[in-house]
Amino acid sequence: MQVFLPRWSPDGTQIAFAATTPGKPQKICLIPAEGGEPEQVTKGDYNEGDVGWSADGNQLVSGFTGPFPAKGVAIHLLDLRMHQESLLPGSEGLFSPRWSPDGRYVAALPLNGESLRLYEFATQKWVELAKLPMGYPSWSRDSQYIYFDTLGSDAAFYRVHVSDRKLERLVSLKNVRRSGTYQWTGLTPDGSPLLLRDVGTEEIYALDWQAP
């Protein structure tokens, strides 16, 4: 089994992740935080990944690709109590869903990754929060901001204020050597930025090893 992008449940008792086995589509699984056997909680002949939790821990949100819907890419909601999946309205062509901690919104990216979209459950409508080539959106704990990074010659770390869509450039990443495969960014519990940096040829480590 290959595992991708694990996410802790809000109460810290479970971990949701995407997993794939040879010849089968990638599906969403749950496992107790203390360990045990993983439980596959989604079905169907499509691939699902990039899973996230609702604030109450009763639902999951994930992106999927496959024969349904016709456009091939959209966002699923999974009710863990009822074991029912549903399509997030208007989410065709979107991926990388992020549920806000207060439960009011889901943020997502279009396939070209050049804007940030926001779905509000109360209005059941999508709006565009920012228009930049971006990746890895992360919510602040108070649900007031979404943080993300940009790539290219002027790479930087940004945040956008949800209520007024004010965009702030926080720090330049121009001279930071990013990992070629996974250029991940995120936030610590206290809101400090996290960045995956490539140090493969910049630092030297020594290993003491004693043969049995």
Image (cartoon, rainbow, N blue to C red):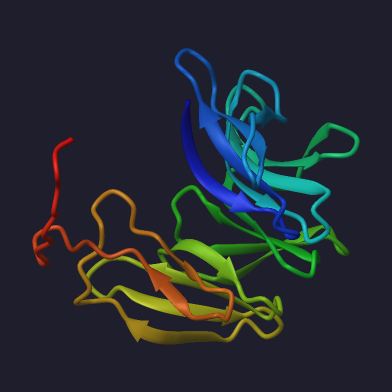
Note whether residue 51 is visible.
yes
- Residue 211: image quadrant is top left
Specify whether 7 is left or right of 90: left
- Give the residue drawn at x 68%, y 20%: 44
* Quarter residue 43 falls in: top right
**Nearer to the camera, 114 or 121:** 121
Q: Position of residue 4 (x, y in %)?
A: 48, 40
| Residue found farthest to the front | 212
* Residue drawn at point x = 64 percent, y = 29 percent: 37
Residue 137 is left or right of residue 124, and the answer is left
- Residue 1 vs residue 94, the one in the foreground: 1
Give above or below for 52 relative to 141. above
Work out which quarter of the rendered image holds the C terminus and state it: top left
Residue at left offset 85%, top offset 32%: 83
x, y (%) of residue 138?
56, 67
Q: Position of residue 125 (x, y in %)?
A: 78, 60
How many numbered tags mark residues here? 0
The residue sitting at 48% across, 61% down in the picture is: 136
Q: Is residue 92 visible?
A: no
Answer left or right for 135 relative to 71.
Answer: left
Of all residues, the one furthest to the top in this rendering is 23
Measured along the vertical axis of the image, is residue 80 above or below residue 94? above
Residue 65 sits above or below residue 112 on the image:
above
